[in-house]
Image (cartoon, rainbow, N blue to C red):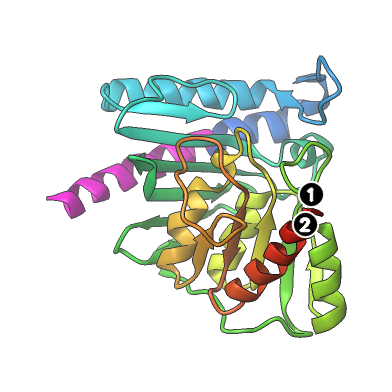
Amino acid sequence: MIEQQNKDYLEFAKVVAYEAGEIMREYYYKKNIKNHYKKPTNDAVEVVTEADEKINRWVIERVKQRFPDHGVYGEEESYNRDSEYVWVCDPIDGTNPFIMGLMVSVFSLALTRNGVPEVGVIYDFHGNKLYESMVGGGAFMNGKQIHVNNLGLEPKARFNADWWVGAGYDPVPVIHQLALDTGMYVLTIGSIAHACALVAKGEFVASLFPGTEGKNVDVAAAKVIIEEAGGKVTDIFGKEQRYDRPIEGAILSNGIVHNEIVERLMVLREEKRL
């Protein structure tokens, strides 16, 4: 019963993802996106485009029509967030790259039940790649099953790391030291959800995300996709957390490297440098 229900939820999420992708294409390819974004009204580094808002509203309308008792936690707008079932949406993860014309931004949508992601999709509209998963069902990209890699923190390992002014934590010292100690290659692609999809696909060994307030939208879908691909996802202290509310950052990994990253971050925390 629950499995069939989740299959139905996943099919709905996939349809919405493709619909969101069409809106992203409309703005990215047919309009001058630089004329359709709103500058921040304060000192924040966050920006938002008309496309972000349009997609967020569209998700809310689709959920209201199909599942009226469900809620939506969106990056730009929310609805009925106290529901048992909440759809967690980042309409455009990687808005700055989207504005700049870089081909990394994705749509991310997860269904949480009491804060636990049960269904997740991440859609790369540039490459027409849909990453999808539901609990117990494996992880797939365009219908082909995907798995995390089996690398450790070593020279041939690629590691995605995010940080920005205003992030909840500053893991940069740990990232620097890990790179020096292991020779791993560190980069930031500009979209945490996209980077997480690449963890699930086996391209990255891990992605480290220091976001907190309102940043559950970035990684909720990745939680179920990566774990169904054989990886592990926790907060930055190695603990489980809810994804229908603010988070304590996230480590999203192949599982093999997870504990070492947590241990390094805990040392930084004890030194009160995190």
Q: Residue at x 41, y 25 (%)?
A: 81
Under circle 2, the secondary element is: loop
Q: Position of residue 77 (x, y in %)?
A: 54, 20
Residue at figure coordinates x 71%, y 34% from the top left? 28
Q: Is residue 184 magenta?
A: no
In primary-sequence order, the first of circles 2 and 1 is 1
Query: Which of labels 2 and 1 is toward the front?
Result: 2
User: In the image shown, does 188 or 242 lie closer to the viewer?
Assistant: 242
Q: Is residue 34 left or right of residue 263?
A: right
Q: Image quarter for residue 214? A: top right
Q: Position of residue 115 (x, y in %)?
A: 39, 41
Please give left or right for residue 32 compared with residue 82 in the image: right
Residue type, label 1:
Trp
Residues at marks 2 and 1 touching, judged by CB atoms closer than 8 Å:
yes
> Which residue does the image show at 31% across and 34% down from the upper left?
85
Task: Tell me if 205 is positioned left or right of 11 in this view.
Answer: right
- As drawn, the label of residue 42 is none
Residue 122, relative to residue 62: is it above or below? below
Crowdedness near tag 1: few (<14), some (14–19) or many (≥20) residues, C-alpha within 10 Å: some
Q: Residues within 10 Å of mark 2 (few under 14, many from 20)?
A: many
Q: Which residue is mark 1?
A: 163
Residue, far left: 1
Type of amino acid at the residue the image marks with label 2: Pro
Q: Secondary structure at mark 1?
A: loop
Q: Which residues are magenta?
A: 1-20
Residue 9 position in % (x across, y down): 29, 43
- Image: 183 above or below 131: below
Q: Residue at x 60, y 21 (%)?
A: 53
Asked if residue 247 can be seen in this view, the reply is: yes
Q: Which mark is residue 171?
A: 2
**Secondary structure mostly taken by the magenta-highlighted segment of the chain:** helix
- Per the model, the C-alpha gap separating discs 2 and 1 is 8 Å
